[in-house]
Image (cartoon, grey):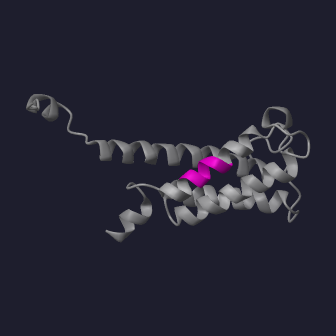
Amino acid sequence: MTTTTDTRRAAAHPITATKRNDLVLAAFRVVVSFLFGLHGLQGLGFLGGVDGQGGAVPFGSWPGWYGSVIELVGAVLVLTGLAARPAAFVLSGVMAYAYFTVHQPEALLPMHNMGELAAVYSWVFLLLAVLGPGAFTVQRALRR
């Protein structure tokens, strides 16, 4: 049995699977870290704050204020791709900590303890820590 390739089809789709995967990973990384960074800003009193009235977590309080700073700094690092793997790993741990200390004591399941977002972010950042930031990062551009 012989196989033939359609050269017209290959020429019509110049984006390879690898390039497409890199683009999707970059878009995923940027969007997720941007949205996550907004949570960090809220804890610091921006974007309506933690209470919708501009209230911030008290300065220096554990874990709220430090968590907000870690969220914001980590989100910027992941977004830009600078030290993205370690930052994503730390953010995964921060969200796991938030889930198990804040949400899980309220109820067993995330649907009942309002911890879905913390659980999802924890797994998303663990995925980014394992896969890495992809090809399109500031760190890679600086190396060139």
Q: Is residue 124 magenta?
A: yes
Q: Is 89 on the left-hand or right-hand side of 99?
A: left
The outermost residue toward the bottom is: 143
Magenta-drawn stretch, dominant element (helix, strand or loop): helix
Q: Residue at x 83, y 44 (%)?
A: 50
Q: Residue 140 location, x and y as percent?
A: 38, 64
Q: Is 26 on the left-hand or right-hand side of 7?
A: right
Q: Residue 11 location, x and y as percent?
A: 13, 34
| Viewer can see residue 89 | yes
Q: Residue 89 location, x and y as percent?
A: 62, 61
Q: How many marks?
A: 0
In the image shown, does 55 or 19 lie closer to the viewer?
A: 19
Q: Residue at x 34, y 42 (%)?
A: 20
Q: Is residue 110 above or below residue 101?
A: above
Q: Residue 55 location, x and y as percent?
A: 86, 47
In the image shown, does 83 or 115 lie closer to the viewer?
A: 115
Q: Is 135 on the left-hand or right-hand side of 50?
A: left
- In the picture, the quarter occupied by the C terminus is bottom left
Give the residues in magenta: 122-127
Q: Residue at x 72, y 44 (%)?
A: 119
In the image shown, does 79 or 49 lie closer to the viewer?
A: 79
Q: Residue at x 64, y 48 (%)?
A: 123
The outermost residue toward the front is: 1
Q: Is residue 95 above or below residue 143?
A: above
Q: Is residue 63 above or below residue 17?
A: below
Quarter where residue 31 is shown: top right
Q: Is residue 74 magenta?
A: no
The outermost residue toward the right is: 106
| Viewer can see residue 45 | no
- In the picture, the quarter occupied by the N terminus is top left
